[in-house]
Image (tube, grey):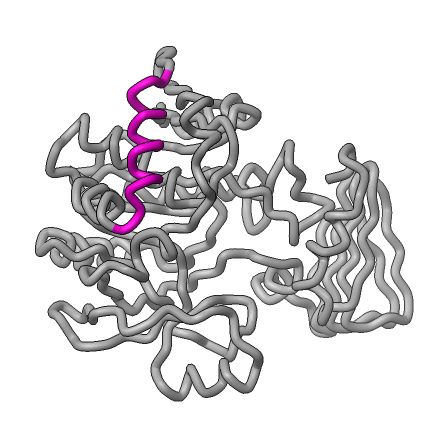
Amino acid sequence: MIIPIILSGGSGTRLWPLSRKTMPKQFRSLTGTNTLIQDTASRLTSLSNVGRPLVVCGAAHVDRVIEQLGALNTVPSILIEPAAKNTAPAVASACLAAVEQDPNAIVVVLPSDHVLGDVAEFARMVSLATITADQGYLTTFGVIPTYPATGYGYIQPGEPIANGASRIAAFVEKPDVNTATRYLEEGFLWNAGIFVFRAADFLTELEIHSPAMYELVTTAYERSTITGNTRLLDDDSWSAIEPQSVDYAVMEPTTRGAVLPLSCGWSDIGSWATLHDLGNADEDGNVVGGQVYLSNVTNSYVRSESKPVVVLGVHDLIIVETDDSVLVMHRDCAEDIKTVTERLPDDLK
């Protein structure tokens, strides 16, 4: 059985002011009618032999998860994190739940805030990934780059395995533009943070490479409180966990890592500039939403949530209006907004 794990613990600060701690981007409709988490759940119907999704989120977002997935007639099992501890503990707790359902379960780990344009191709690649997972590999998808992105980490494929997969030669951090250009020439892939593996294999590797985390996550899971379809992980054990990503805790040190190249219109919608690139631009390169009125404006993204916005004689800007905030910035600053939002009062974060 394939058990989907949907990670919904992110705050999406680079999409401020629309994405906030209380209402992060996965619960927003940014590229269509459905919200991002609804799109994530919807694409699971393209997979075969799929069980009920496991959603990992914070207590503040449980009701939103239930409401938004319920609108799709989906009833998830929900693991509640007492605090955000990055992706490795979240995935580990969900793998413990998956193994309880099926000791041989294969899990598909999906961030809740990504866009995938070609769902059929994604489903085909998941099928291939289950083959490598059955062979004991911890498989991740590496997106085939379309430009030298500096906002993504990269994966260097190594020795070919089978079915298009390769061993992972290296993970590399976000590069500068010259390094990113070289990565494209050398066949590196964007690190998408999407995984397919046997839940038991992941837990085995976590115990080997991050034994302290494994012990604390296991204790937090065993001492959790179950209410209906939700499981609140034990706060005492969970609070002692050092935050770490799946890549650092398991995928980098393991000898069982594999990567499959993926090309299906993927985006993590990591910034307003990315949303501009994904939108339907007019003849002047502008993407607009809401009550927006432009004159002599080019290559800009302008979004109004609550009141009319009039923009004249500017170029290459991001302008976003909500009921309590307005963002105005140059497109080139889209990756830097997090440093500003960290200085905002708590009621605006």
Q: Is residue 243 visible?
A: yes
- Residue positioned 83% across, 70% down in the render: 297
In x, y percent, where is residue 101?
A: 18, 27
- Residue positioned 86% across, 70% down in the render: 314
Q: Main secondary structure of the magenta part?
A: helix
In x, y percent, where is residue 348?
A: 77, 38
Q: Is residue 14 left or right of residue 340?
A: left
As rendered, which of 155 and 318 lies closer to the eye? Answer: 155
Quadrant (top left/top right/bottom left/bottom right) for the C terminus: top right
- Residue positioned 31% across, 34% down in the render: 94
Quadrant (top left/top right/bottom left/bottom right) for the N terminus: top left
Q: Is residue 180 left or right of residue 207?
A: right
Q: Is residue 51 left or right of residue 93?
A: left
Point out the stretch of residues depicted in magenta: 209-224
As rendered, which of 272 and 92 lies closer to the eye? Answer: 92
The furthest residue to the top: 227
* In the depicted structure, whether residue 221 falls above or below residue 254: above
Q: Is residue 71 visible?
A: no
Answer whether residue 147 is magenta in the image.
no
